[in-house]
Amino acid sequence: MNKFIAPSLLAADFGNLQRDIEMINKSDADWFHIDVMDGVFVPNISFGMPVIKAIKKHAKKTMDVHLMIVDPDRFIGDFKNVGADILTVHYEACPHLHRTVQAIKAQGMKAGVSLNPHTPIAVLEDIIADLDLVLIMSVNPGFGGQSFIENTYKKVAQLKSLIEFSGSNALIEVDGGVTDENIEELSNAGVDAFVAGNFVFKSKNPLKTISELKKLATG
Ligand code: DX5
Ligand code: ZN
């Protein structure tokens, strides 16, 4: 089974963004995780299209875009245009989730759905077959550097059985507070993709940290 490491650029040095992107290009990381926050769905604002476009100019790996915004349907075409490969929306922000997921796929992107820590896996029962990825938030979205919520393990196990039961091909991604202390257990529980922000970018040697995470995840 492939395991994907997705460093979150939210924790990068925005004054040296190209340097940090090149570091990820040459690292063992698999994806660029890009957090878009609107100050409405979450109590923080990150960055928008011009910055993503600039990232895409240098990034040589999959662009995994995580939308923490209300009414994401308005921008699906724009995110395609600035280079998103995977586009993940929040279940809590989409009253017509089926339509949103189809619209993402119609643009040729992989479609992901994210769940906040309090949202049960069971809400995905009737959409799981259509999804390419489910992103389980292991912190409350809005900020990097928070502590991992332990209840995530239970949700990963529940999601794994839902995926197996439904025959879905969805990947399981976990986002928030991922470190060398929990990545192995998450991987064993069935997580495919691991977002890591602060643990990578605030470490002394991000290249080495990424390699270590990849090794721990791969087993
Ligand atoms: C939180 C974001 C995360 C965040 C993770 O709202 O979705 O992607 O950057 O950061 P760490 O790994 O520092 O918890
Ligand atoms: Zn994220």
Image (spheres, rainbow, N blue to C red):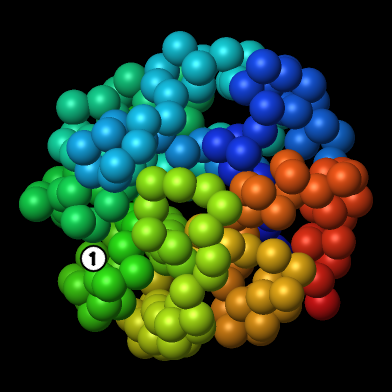
As drawn, 53 above or below 125? above
Q: Quadrant of residue 33?
A: top right
Q: Quadrant of residue 44?
A: top left
Q: Quadrant of the N terminus?
A: bottom right
Residue lying at 76% horizontally and 68% vertically, measured from the top left: 180
Q: Residue at x 30, y 77 (%)?
A: 121
List the single residue furthest toward the left: 95
Q: Is residue 30 left or right of residue 32?
A: right
Give the left or right position of residue 206, taking residue 132 as reference: right
- Left or right of 6? Residue 82 is left
Q: Is residue 210 above or below residue 135?
A: above
Name above or below for residue 16 compared with residue 153.
Answer: above
Q: Amino acid at mark 1?
A: Ile
Q: Residue at x 73, y 75 (%)?
A: 181
- Label 1 within 8 A of ligand 2 by Cβ: no
Residue under label 1, please give it.
127
Q: Mark 1, residues whose alpha carbon is within 10 Å: few (<14), some, or many (≥20)?
A: some
Residue 131 visible somewhere in the drawing: no
Q: Quadrant of the C terminus?
A: bottom right
Please name whichever residue, 165 or 200, is drawn nearer the observer in this view of the structure.
Answer: 200
Q: Residue at position x 33%, y 56% from top?
A: 113
Indicate the position of residue 38 as horizontal and vertical percent values: 29, 32
In front of the other: 106 or 175? 175
